[in-house]
Image (cartoon, helix red, strand yellow):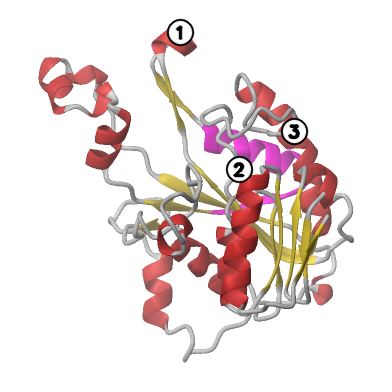
Amino acid sequence: MKQYINDKMALYNGDCVQVIKQLPNESVHFQIFSPPFANLYIYSDDLADMGNCKNSDEFFIQFDFLIPELYRVLKPGRLCAVHCKDLVKYKNRDGVAGIYDFSGDIIKHFEKFGFQYHSRITIWKDPVTEMQRTKAHGLLWKQLRKDSTFSRMGMPDYILLFRKWADDEEIIEPVTHTMEDFPVRKWQQYASPVWEYESTPVWWDIQQTNVLNVKSAKDDKDEKHICPLQLDVIERLIELYSNPDDVVFTPFLGIGSEAYVALKMGRKAIGVELKESYFNQAVTYCKDITNNDQISFFK
């Protein structure tokens, strides 16, 4: 197993379920990741790849091995942030066209293992861009004119936040902010719904192209990760829910977005990635952001 370790980070090329078992209890301050979206994308043919599944039931059988370990390594009173979206059902594949409440199933499975559902953030996505990318009939204006009962709304991304509650509040390490580093207007922007009757905060100003493989790629031949999380989303969450020098953990490192931002913001990073080519890119990006040439890279 490849490892990339120094005093600021520990990055592993392997199965996240196996690697996380080696981490000490309550050693992580904040968790943030974008898991495979059930069988929406298949990243590799490895049996340990959770995206290598035939349906959502099979995905959650695998995911359920990870969730209790996430709970174990997280410090009491701290949070886990999961990036996800609901998924489209197709008649030719699923027998019916519609929407699968993937985010709802994630909440059920996290609560099954002790986490408390804490909050949801909606990340606005342009329905025109979604229509052009997916060719979804439900978003076509042509379909609206033909029969609008098949028309549906655009699908946002979500950040689901889960808390590990502490029996003894005295052991909690709080995340604190000052009026200077987090003014009230900034908090109102992050916490307030965009529309008067929205039930969850909506982050409408996220730059969809602000991703690591656009911002940091060295040449056009670099392999592109299918769906890296936007860097401004990661930065906001790390700023909100961790202190400087805290340990930020991601079990789905991908090309390194979460670790990259954590290191940039003065945190420590632990990450695990199964696919070797993604892991190698993550190593390069994290090394660049720390400007440290004394890092060991070994098998």
**What's under tag 3, amino acid-wise?**
Ala
Predominant secondary structure, magenta span: helix
Give the x, y percent position of residue 262: 60, 70
- 121 displayed left or right of 62: left
Please name the residue that numbered disc 1 is placed on: 95
Q: Is residue 185 left or right of residue 135?
A: right
Which is closer to the viewer, label 2 or label 1?
Answer: 2
Q: Any mark on residue 35, and which?
A: 2
Q: Is residue 50 located in the magenta-colored stretch of the structure?
A: no
Residue at image point 69% right, 34% down: 49
In this picture, which residue range is highlighted in magenta? 102-119
The numbered mark at residue 283 is: none
As for residue 114 lying within the magenta part, the answer is: yes
286 relative to 1 in the view: left or right: left
Give the camera-side residue of 111 and 56: 56
Residue carrying label 3: 48
